[in-house]
Image (tube, helix red, strand yellow):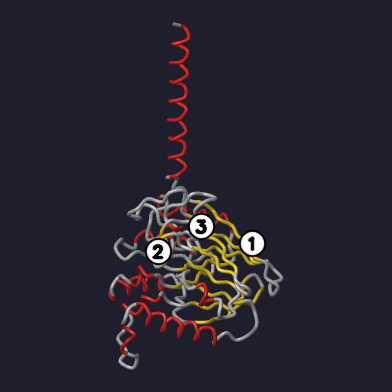
Amino acid sequence: MNSKKSIFTRKRIVTLAIILALVVLAILAFDSRLLIRRYTIEAEEITNSIRIALVTDLHSCKYGEGQSELIEAVAAQNPDVVFLVGDIFDDVLEDTNTELFLAGIADKYPCYYVTGNHECWSGSYNFSVKMSILEKYDIPVLSGETMTLTVNGETINLCGVDDPHIYLVEPYDETKPKEYLDEYGNQMQDYTGRLNAVHEAVPNDNYTILLSHRPEFFDLYAEYDFDLVLCGHAHGGQWRIPGILNGLYAPHQGIFPKYAGGRYDAENMTMIVSRGLARETTWVPRIFNRPELVVIDLE
Ligand SMILES: [Fe+2]
């Protein structure tokens, strides 16, 4: 009788332990608290260090009252510059949360922005509204532009290209080839043209950063001599298994995406892909893939 009772008790303990482990695993898997992800990159051209906050794929998600959680997270990192690398707005959701965030950072740090596909999917009118919000906060939009910046006493070059889907909101230009309106191959053709243009405008050998929403063009970026390329778009591949699988699916990369999030090095270039900040707006939950604010120290 006693032995039967002890087997029963043992089974109950094992069952409870399994349930507890599954609950802990589920809490960890669906944890959507903001994470600070850090990278340090050695840059010979830079004497003083430069701290970059990389913000991508906010999709107008809410981070506390008045976006205080995200604004304070950026402030706690004390960045020298903030790069907003696309899908900061959403094509469906209102711009309110994004605007609150921009209002909270624009007068504290130099900020620079490039478009993502979701801004381009907004339609011409809504796209222009989003651009006017950036203008209201004096945030430059790098739409195929190259500029020279002085950050923390260092002079660097900054290039920015639009998302390839910008053709959806660009005014029709009859001088452009007809194929320009086609989807994949011609989009690449145009994208190469845009990269050529910003690259040719780089005025010196100083450290050069490219802002581009799309990480899937890694091989193309590596053909140029950008030192650092900063991207988003992949949302970390949505589902991850730490140490085993760095992302299950990413737009424009498909399943098992190569550039879902992290650091990718080519011979002369490093690409950092942020897993982005989208959370409540994603129709598939993020698993083992906390939304992240990326902080990069160039030193
Ligand atoms: Fe995107």
Relative vertical location of residue 60 with respect to residue 7 in this rendering, above or below: below
Q: What residue type is labelled 1?
A: Thr
Horizontally, is 236 left or right of 177 in the view? right
Q: Earlier in the sequence, mark 3 or mark 2?
A: 2
Location of residue 223 in the rendering, given as x and y in whole percent from the top left corner: 55, 80
- Label 3 CB sits under 8 Å from any ligand 1 atom: no
Q: Earlier in the sequence, mark 2 or mark 1?
A: 1
Location of residue 289 in the rendering, given as x and y in whole percent from the top left corner: 46, 51
Relative vertical location of residue 29 with respect to residue 124 in this rendering, above or below: above
From where the camera sits, is residue 284 visible?
A: yes
Q: Which mark is residue 254?
A: 2
Q: Residues within 10 Å of mark 1 (few under 14, many from 20)?
A: few
Q: Which of marks 1 and 3 is nearer the N terminus?
A: 1
Q: Residue 216 carries which label?
A: none
Location of residue 264 in the rendering, given as x and y in whole percent from the top left corner: 57, 66
Q: How far apart are marks 1 and 3 (CA)?
A: 14 Å
Q: Which amino acid does label 2 sit on?
A: Gly
Q: Which corner quadrant holds the C terminus? A: bottom right
Q: Mark 1 points at which residue?
A: 40
Ligand 1 shown in quarter: bottom left
Task: Point out the residue furthest to the top here.
Answer: 1
- Could you say whether the residue bearing mark 3 is in a helix, strand or loop? strand
Q: Mark 3 points at which residue?
A: 293
Location of residue 279 in the rendering, given as x and y in whole percent from the top left corner: 39, 53
Q: Residue at x 50, y 73 (%)?
A: 211
Q: Which amino acid does label 3 sit on?
A: Leu
For the residue pair 118 and 214, the one nearer the viewer reads as 214
Q: Which residue is drawn at 44% across and 79% down?
A: 143
Q: How crowded is mark 2: few (under 14 residues within 10 Å), some or many (20 or more)?
A: few
